[in-house]
Image: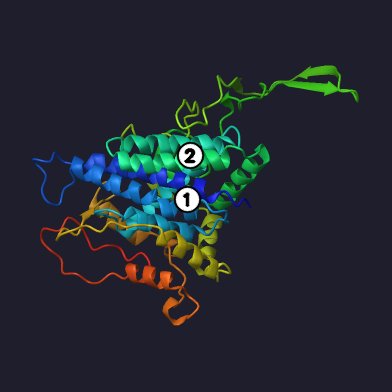
Amino acid sequence: MSMRTLPLLFLNLGGEMLYILDQRLRAQHIPGDKARKDEWTEVDRKRVLNDIISTMFNRKFMEELFKPQELYSKKALRTIYERLAHASIMKLNQASMDKLYDLMTMAFKYQVLLCPRPKDVLLVTFNHLDTIKGFIRDSPTILQQVDETFRQLIEIYGGLSAGEFQLIRQTLLIFFQDLHIRVSMFLKDKVQNNNGRFVLPVSGPVPWGTELPGLIRMFNNKGEEVKRIEFKHGGNYVRAPKEGSFELYGDRVLKLGTNMYSLNRPVETHMSGSSKNLASWTQESIAPNPLAKEELNFLARLMGGMEIKKPSGPEPGFRLNLFTSDEEEEQAALTRPEELSHEVINIQATQDQQRSEELARIMGEFEITEQPRLNTSKGDDLLAMMDEL
């Protein structure tokens, strides 16, 4: 397991989350002069993206994220994204949050699988950050935050060997193992089968610095080539035109990690019928977690660095639906297998004197008090992301 995987996982999944939210906010927004109080406008979309990106690239949060550490469970990371998604005036109910996380994870899993070289996962990350910078081009302060993260990535990962990147890629694939959620966009493009597994291509450019397949060269003990054998590989490969840029600005060449929702097509998710996949999630949900204490400390450190901007005034926030209708969202919530619900570990932090005061403060921020519904409300009550740890 690589100790340098977490920043790449977090930034790429976060980039996919922003792509999805941007697409849905654009699809649902109404011109400002015609919008009711419970409808989205272009100003609201920019505000949501700015707030989330500002929180995501908070300096203290990034400092904790870039410290060498092992990956933790999907459950722990999901909690981070659930808190991050509610860093602005936007509210998602459980079904929409489930769908958002499913889309994020399957998109990045596909990108990792298709990376020509292990090192190219860094180019995928740069593609996400390049697009994120486009979302905040009118906000120089937030733009500076993203550029600082860019520089950290270049400094830390620029000098890693091919073997170290291979270990990072392997760690990512282990994290995504047995996760086979069908996505309508992938199914329509025929890059995913009905069982949720991806179809790897047998054509296109080969990794930079490698030769086209189809030739076997044999050498003697002196290192001299003595024989060549050609064979049919059955694919349609071409040489890579050039290597992508690993600098702050430049042509990444690789398209993985760019915004695939820019075509504005609807995206649906469906759980595959794989019993193995279901069993995997069930085991993670109910089995005692030997890393529970470590994950608790991990969440405390990361969330301690997050600065959540709470809406001011009487406006409790907007509600965003990632489904095509409220009825579909309600149906998804009812039909979602109970085994796949994302529960958290019950640990009474307030009764343990060894827990830090910082963690107790964070726990207090997660407590949601009941508030009366207002007719002018733009959304539902904020999700209780963690009732107890």
Can the viewer see residue 224? yes
Q: Is residue 29 left or right of residue 16?
A: left
Q: Quick one: label 2, few (<14), some, or many (20+) residues within 10 Å?
A: some
- Element assignment for label 2: helix
Q: Residue at x 43, y 57 (%)?
A: 78
Q: Is residue 289 left or right of residue 99?
A: right
From this view, report whether residue 339 is shown above or below residue 260: below
Q: Is residue 178 above or below residue 245?
A: below
Q: Are marks 1 and 2 in contact (CB under 8 Å)?
A: no
Colour treatment of the image = rainbow
The numbered mark at residue 272 is 1
Quadrant that contains the C terminus: bottom left
Identify which residue is drawn at 19% across, 60% down: 316
Question: Please, which residue is most extreme toward the left here?
Answer: 33
Q: Earlier in the sequence, mark 1 or mark 2?
A: 2
In the rendering, at what x and y percent does residue 147 appear? 41, 39
Question: Which mark, residue 18?
Answer: none
- What distance separates the C-alpha of mark 1 from that of mark 2? 39 Å
Q: Nearer the viewer, residue 194 or 352?
A: 352
The kind of residue on which mark 2 rests is Arg
Where does label 2 land, which residue? 151
Q: Quadrant of residue 213?
A: top right
Residue 2 image offset from top left, x and y in percent: 62, 50
Q: Determine whether the residue tagged by mark 1 lies in a helix, strand or loop.
A: loop
| Circle 1: residue type | Ser
Residue at x 35%, y 51% (from the top left corner): 55
For image coordinates 27% across by 36% down, the residue present is 138
Q: Answer whether residue 261 is visible to the viewer in this image.
A: no
- Residue 86 horizontal side relative to residue 113, left or right: left
Residue 166 % position (x, y): 64, 41
- Which one is in front in this view, the residue at disc 1 or the one at disc 2? 2
